[in-house]
Amino acid sequence: MKLKLLFLLVIVYVSGCARKTFNGPDRLFYKEEMEKARRLQEQKDTGQVGQTAATGTKPGTPPTYLSKEDRTKFARILGIKDNEIENEKLYHTINKWLGVPYLWGGTTKRGVDCSAFVQHVYKDVYGQQLPRTSIEQFYLNTKAQFKGQKYLKQGDLVFFRLRHKDKIVSHVGIYLQNGKFLGSNSPRGVEIVDLNDDYWQDKYVASARLLNKNN
């Protein structure tokens, strides 16, 4: 009987020690590990683990396309602050094309004309396919056209008539920010220029918002 009582006392003592240990730092450790495992499983279920590994950012954080130096470069060109750059993917694509020479009928980085360049940017940045020529792009959706430049937003197309003998339009570019637009312009090639310059104001015809709503 005494032996049984002693055995029960040992069991009670050991159980008490176990509870004390588990209620201390060990319990907190195991709780944190279980929480990490739960979050990891949630990320796997939503497909966010691959995104985190590929971009080096936390899930839900927009990927970074520009270095600090590139952000500063484009901010200076646009006349804005570094943190006002919108859509880094767009400027990352622009960075690849800046300085490419203008070539009428050209479609590559050896030489590209205005409408082919706009085609490339829309496909690479927005995943949207546009017609090949500026006149086709102009007539793609006439309901999306507008004249007032104060309504321009990034990604809008801007159309120009460079010569009076030209058709309704003969040149196209993409509006960026702060009065600047992007285009492959003869003779300088791909560049960012000021829409408010007298030359472009004199040639301006209209703009069009052709981006899909989810862009």
Image (tube, grey):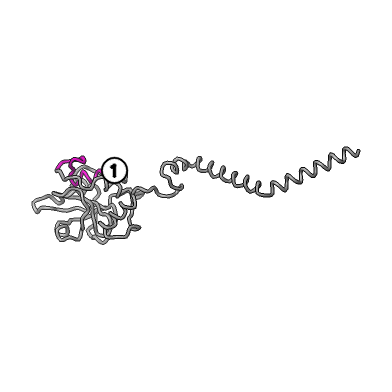
Compared across the picture, whether 126 is left or right of 39 comes to left
Q: Secondary structure at mark 1?
A: helix
Q: In front: 131, or 179?
A: 179
Q: Count of labels shown?
A: 1
110 magenta-colored: yes
Q: 10 Å neighbourhood of mark 1: few (<14), some, or many (≥20)?
A: few
Q: In front: 58, or 6?
A: 6
Amino acid beneath label 1: Lys
Q: Which residues are magenta?
A: 104-122
Compared across the picture, whether 27 is left or right of 144 comes to right
At 59% from the left and 47% from the top, the residue drawn is 32
Question: Which residue has dot 1 on it?
Answer: 123
- How far from the left and from the top, in percent, is residue 7? 84, 39
Compared across the picture, whether 145 is left or right of 44 comes to left
At 14% from the left and 53% from the top, the residue drawn is 161
> Does residue 119 sit above or below 81 in this rendering?
above
